[in-house]
Image (cartoon, grey):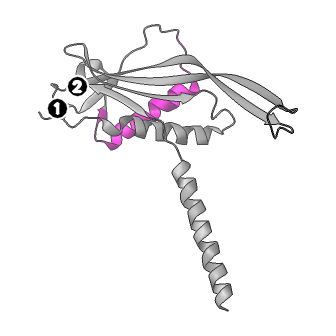
Amino acid sequence: MEYQMYCMKLKLFTLAGLILLLFACKTIAPVNTDYDTSFNYLKLKNYAWMKLKDPKQVISLDERRSINAIDAVLKEKGFNKVTSREKADFVLSSHIIKDKKTDVDSFYRTWGYYPFYDNWHHNFNQTVKREYQVNTFVLDVIDPQNKQMIWRGSLSAKSGIYKRSTPEVRVKKARQRAQNLLSSFPPKTQN
């Protein structure tokens, strides 16, 4: 009976450890932010999106999901979206930077009989090169009166991570990215 209790506790402890390990492995993409420390962010209430420079430019579905998610997060934070830039306290502009990255990994293996290092043995070297694309979503907050940027946030992720996802999952991921991106907006300043 004592042995069974010991086995049960060991199984529960192992299961709890595995669950903790799984949650520890969940990664959140790092957010980079920069802002004007002299600006009074407390006066910000209304915002508008900057118009596209090229009216023929097509916005992708993922970009539209990101914009809608940012709108929802800003609404939760108490900001109001307005249609004209004249009524806005701040203007949002976003763009995506696509960058190609390369990972190179080398693997070394030795096998064979070599007790004195002069008998036969084989060394193998294998190098794997992987190219992938990283998309960086950049959100700029602009003061429309001075036409100066007052806050910038960016978030990077590998391209194609969610390519097999349903539209509902993509909306959920866009919402998580927007919450992560806007977690430090408006910044806490000394004004």
Quarter of the image holding residue 122? top right
Q: At 26% from the left edge and 25% from the top edge, which residue is drawn?
A: 35
Q: What residue type is disc 2 on?
A: Asp
Visible residue check, residue 83: no
Kindly indicate whether the residue at mark 1 contacts the one at mark 2 (C-beta within 8 angstroms).
yes
Please identify the quadrant where the N terminus is shown. bottom right
Q: Between residues 41 and 32, which one lies in front from this camera angle? A: 32
At x 48%, y 9%, the residue is 55
Return the x and y of residue 80 as percentages of the image width and height: 29, 34
Decide: is 13 above or below 114: below
Q: Is residue 159 visible?
A: yes
How many other residues sit within 10 Å of disc 2, few (<14), some (14-19) or many (≥20)? many
* Quadrant of residue 134 within the rendered picture: top right
Q: Which residue is mark 2?
A: 89
Is residue 145 or residue 35 the one in the foreground?
Answer: 35
Q: Which quadrant of the view contains residue 121?
A: top right
Per the picture, the main secondary structure of the magenta-coloured stretch is helix
At label 1, the amino acid type is Lys
Q: Position of residue 103 (x, y in %)?
A: 63, 24
Residue 70 drawn in magenta: yes
Q: Which label number is shown at residue 43?
A: 1
Disc 1 crowd, CA 10 A, few/some/many (<14, 14-19, 20+): few
Image quadrant occupied by the C terminus: top left
Residue 189 magenta-highlighted: no
Tell me where the magenta segment starts and ends, as one range: 57-80
Q: Report the residue that reaches farthest toward the left.
A: 191
